[in-house]
Amino acid sequence: MVWRARGDEAKNTNPDFRKSRMEHRVKSGETVGLLAYQEGEPIGWCSVAPRTTYRDLGGPHDYEDDPNAVWSLTCFSVAKEHRKKGLSSALLEAAIGYARDNGAKVIEAYPVAPNSPSYQYMGLVPQFERRGFTYIQDAGSRRRVHRLEL
């Protein structure tokens, strides 16, 4: 939610407020991401949607004439007992396919180095490089912008 909040919404860090805003987005039909399930239970999630649904993430300001062209993948969340089993890679593959199937020309991610003290939920650089994403530019002191042409 942190990368989606804008204006007054971004100033309100109350967890219940943020949860209600995300619920509103889902119920209104806004694309917010993908869930991974095992035996009917959610075990993982990734935030992937058109870049226009997020605040500025530090990537290039291109494709302004096509708001659906660039999709952003901003974070992963995997239940503790399902970590280190390849679920984030499976979510990454699903996100790439989902973005492509919905008209994206580019998928952009904002991973950090493996030794980064923060933002690791956004993914790690080697995971995206293994999948063919290329470094574009830095986005702050820790995050890097990586892209995959679809």
Image (cartoon, rainbow, N blue to C red):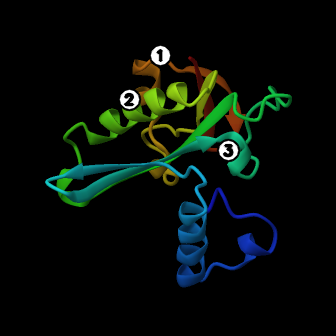
Residue at the spot 61% in from the left edge and 22% down from the top edge: 135
Residue at the spot 44% in from the left edge and 42% down from the top edge: 115
Q: Provide residue 44's location: percent of width, then percent of height.
A: 32, 52
Q: Are marks 1 and 2 in contact (CB under 8 Å)?
A: no
Kind of residue at disc 3: Ser
Vertical placement of residue 137 versus 149, above or below:
below
Q: Is residue 1 visible?
A: no
Mark 3 is surrounded, within 10 Å at the Cα level, by few (under 14), some (14 to 19) or many (20 or more) other residues, namely: few
Real-space CA distance between mark 1 and mark 2, rounded to the nearest whole angstrom: 11 Å
Q: How many marks?
A: 3
Task: Classify mark 3: helix, strand or loop.
Answer: loop
Residue 82 placement, left or right of 140: left
Q: Quadrant of the C terminus?
A: top right
Kind of residue at disc 2: Glu
Q: Are marks 3 and 1 in contact (CB under 8 Å)?
A: no
Name the residue that disc number 1 marks.
132
Task: Classify mark 1: helix, strand or loop.
Answer: loop
Residue at the spot 52% in from the left edge and 40% down from the top edge: 112
Q: Is residue 10 visible?
A: yes
Q: Which mark is residue 93?
A: 2
Looking at the image, tell me whether mark 3 or mark 1 is earlier in sequence order.
Answer: 1
Name the residue that disc number 3 marks.
141
The residue positioned farthest toward the right in the image shown: 65
